[in-house]
Image (cartoon, rainbow, N blue to C red):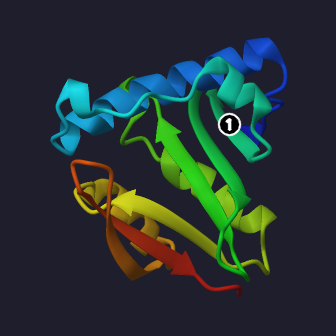
Amino acid sequence: MLSVQPLQTRDPEVALEVQAVFALAQQQEAVQIGLAPADTPPGRSLGDVMASTDFHLGARDGPHLVGVLAVGPDDEAGQVAISALVVHPAHQRRGIGRALLREALARGAGLGFCVTASARNPAALALYASAGFVAYRHGALGPQALPMVKLRRPAA
């Protein structure tokens, strides 16, 4: 049974679980969007996860962490940023990302949200669009000029 709850990423055991899900999901997305292994940016280290000031939600299927969503400050006033939304590759297409997003939006009722996603990740873009996010900025990231989209969902 799926449960979504806040994660205490300062706890080394929890941080290790979070880092493992991040690593698997990042490897998968790099392949999906066409990045060569040498062009894939380094993932979040255990230290990065433990030092993060973002608020983390985790989705557990029984004792297993299968998804993570992180929310933190944005560089634009009036909104908070979803800095990460990842689902373990073996657990995708089961509504886990949607459940994490729904919980974050409910906890942040009254706040404007934004997220940056790869323009080459149609599944992510569709998920955010289904939750009321609208693209408002386009750009490129890194030496590979990876096309990116920034989306926002205004405060309700």
Read off the residue under disc 1: 58
Residue nearest the observer in this picture, 23 or 143:
143
Residue nearest the observer in this picture, 64 or 151:
151
Quarter of the view holding residue 42: top left
Estimate the x, y position of residue 64 in percent, counting from the top left.
Answer: 61, 18
What is the three-letter code of the residue carrying label 1?
Answer: Gly
Q: Which residue appears farthest toward the top when viewing the image?
A: 13
Q: Residue at x 36, y 42 (%)?
A: 93
Q: Residue at x 44, y 71 (%)?
A: 150
Q: Residue at x 56, y 35 (%)?
A: 67
Compared across the picture, whether 140 is left or right of 6 comes to left
Q: Residue 114, relative to residue 46: is it above or below?
A: below
Residue nearest the observer in this picture, 98 or 111:
111
Residue nearest the observer in this picture, 138 or 27:
138
Q: Residue 37, relative to residue 32: is it above or below?
A: above
Q: Residue 22, relative to residue 84: is it above or below?
A: above
Estimate the x, y position of residue 1 in percent, counting from the top left.
Answer: 63, 30
Residue 16 visible to an observer of this rendering: yes
Q: Secondary structure at mark 1?
A: strand
Task: Report the quarter where the C terminus lies.
Answer: bottom right
Estimate the x, y position of residue 117 in percent, counting from the top left.
Answer: 40, 59
